[in-house]
Amino acid sequence: MRLTTLAPFLALALALGLPLTLAAPTSPSASPLPLIIWHGLGDRYDADGLSQVAELAAQVHPGSYVYPIRISEDGSDDQKATFFGNLTTQINTVCTTLSTDPLLNSNHTRIDALGFSQGGQFLRGLIETCPSIRVRSLVTFGSQHNGIAKFQTCGTWDLLCKGAVGLVRGNAWTAWVQGNIVPAQYYREINETTGEGSETYLDSSGWLADVNNERDVKNAKYKERLGALERFVMYIFSEDKTVIPKESGWFAEVNATDGTVTQVRNRTMYAEDWIGLRRLDEKGALVFREAPGEHMRLDEDLLRETFAAYFGPERESWDGTETETTSGGEDQVVLGLYEL
Ligand SMILES: *[C@@H]1O[C@H](CO)[C@@H](O)[C@H](O)[C@H]1NC(C)=O
Ligand SMILES: *[C@@H]1O[C@H](CO)[C@@H](O)[C@H](O)[C@H]1NC(C)=O
Ligand SMILES: *[C@@H]1O[C@H](CO)[C@@H](O)[C@H](O)[C@H]1NC(C)=O
Ligand SMILES: *[C@@H]1O[C@H](CO)[C@@H](O)[C@H](O)[C@H]1NC(C)=O
Ligand SMILES: *[C@@H]1O[C@H](CO)[C@@H](O)[C@H](O)[C@H]1NC(C)=O
């Protein structure tokens, strides 16, 4: 089992004395918006890697209140909940928790959100379905917004992973699996003729088909809430071999037969604006980014630049945040045990 290798992270940052580029046009006295972070599959909210990301956020924007999202206060139960549970219920629980946290939701506070891997699409779903939070920037790394076409291969000793994937095998669309196995709830199958979600998927998906507004009856609130973001930044990893297909992180559709990628701007979900992506794009709020390397090999410079550009105090304009931030650093970090 691979352990998180984020440990040398902060020491390294301090040693290098990395400059803060991309200073945002904000007033120096304004306090940073609170930041919520949702971790990935197999990870837990109290993992060292997560605390280090939180500390980095507070280094970039001193005074930041950072809340790592959890399904349980018990770290080990939180980790299990990344594999097992009803995603709709989990997200509703998080909505209630955030709505009643005075540090996150008093006096119409706006917050920023950072999602790693599956935590990215869960945050996106949270924004669409939770009426009482107001999010300014959403940043996702290596997420599966358009679902997965294949379940990942588990490591020999990844017993949680094996348990979950074993239950899915051959039963992906049963009501039990769609209500109890987390990755199955963002599994997606397409009809190769129409290029849209298959009938089985639309009928049986326990979560993704709903938040992607793929069914005939659309929920207008999803579009309104997601479309209200000021920035939605989506990173995919250029060498990602865990997320299949990796372009899912940009809401792209991949033809399984010939591998053709249809970018979101060429999809029906964009043309008809099912969830507000077109609205975001038209106001310059939809940001497509590619990071080098494999799934979740996060580079510290890249995180710093991202935090500086999209988080922090309220700002009057977003000038200067759209420059390319391809990171050249070599110090990469792996978040989570399973990386999805
Ligand atoms: C609420 O926020 C406004 C502006 O941000 C501020 O002027 C006001 O004092 C705040 N009220 C409370 C009760 O914190
Ligand atoms: C998951 O939970 C939601 C409400 O929390 C419920 O409506 C739904 O039926 C559940 N899904 C399954 C497949 O059991
Ligand atoms: C794919 O969609 C076409 C057109 O709607 C339909 O005729 C066909 O039965 C679908 N195929 C499958 C496997 O569902
Ligand atoms: C997917 O690719 C196959 C093979 O090139 C092609 O026959 C099929 O029409 C494509 N599907 C869509 C929806 O473009
Ligand atoms: C995809 O959309 C872009 C505009 O966003 C357009 O220029 C391009 O021709 C489209 N490609 C296809 C294959 O439809």
Image (cartoon, rainbow, N blue to C red):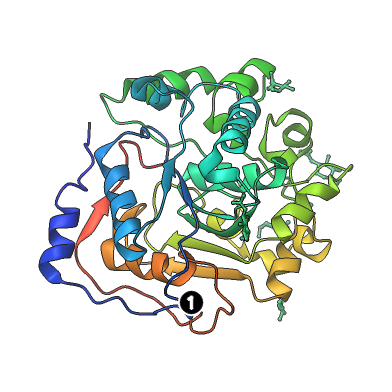
Residue at 24%, 77% in the rendered image = 19
Residue at 75%, 59% in the rendered image = 276
Label tally = 1
Give the answer, above or below, for where 161 lies relative to 221: above
Residue at 54%, 28% in the rendered image = 182
The residue beneath circle 1 is: 26
Residue at 56%, 70% in the rendered image = 287
Quarter of the figure with residue 91? top right
The reply to whether residue 148 is visible in this rendering is no
Mark 1 and ligand 1: say if the CB distance to the nearest ligand atom is below 8 Å: no
**Viewer-proximal residue among 103 and 12:** 103
Quarter of the figure with residue 207? top right
Tag 1 secondary structure? loop
Which class describes the residues within 10 Å of circle 1: few (<14), some (14-19), or many (20+)?
A: some
**Viewer-proximal residue among 302 and 35:** 35
Left or right: residue 46 compared with residue 138: left
Left or right: residue 293 compared with residue 288: left
Residue 147 screen position, x and y as percent: 59, 44
Left or right: residue 309 compared with residue 224: left
Where ligand 4 lies, by quadrant? Answer: bottom right
Residue 104 screen position, x and y as percent: 54, 45
Give the answer, above or below, for where 91 lies relative to 28: above
Residue 90 screen position, x and y as percent: 58, 28
Give the answer, above or below, for where 159 lies relative to 142: above
Residue 216 screen position, x and y as percent: 88, 43
Q: Is the C terminus in the top left, top right, bottom left or bottom right quadrant?
A: top left
The reply to whether residue 208 is visible in this rendering is yes
Q: Amino acid at mark 1?
A: Thr
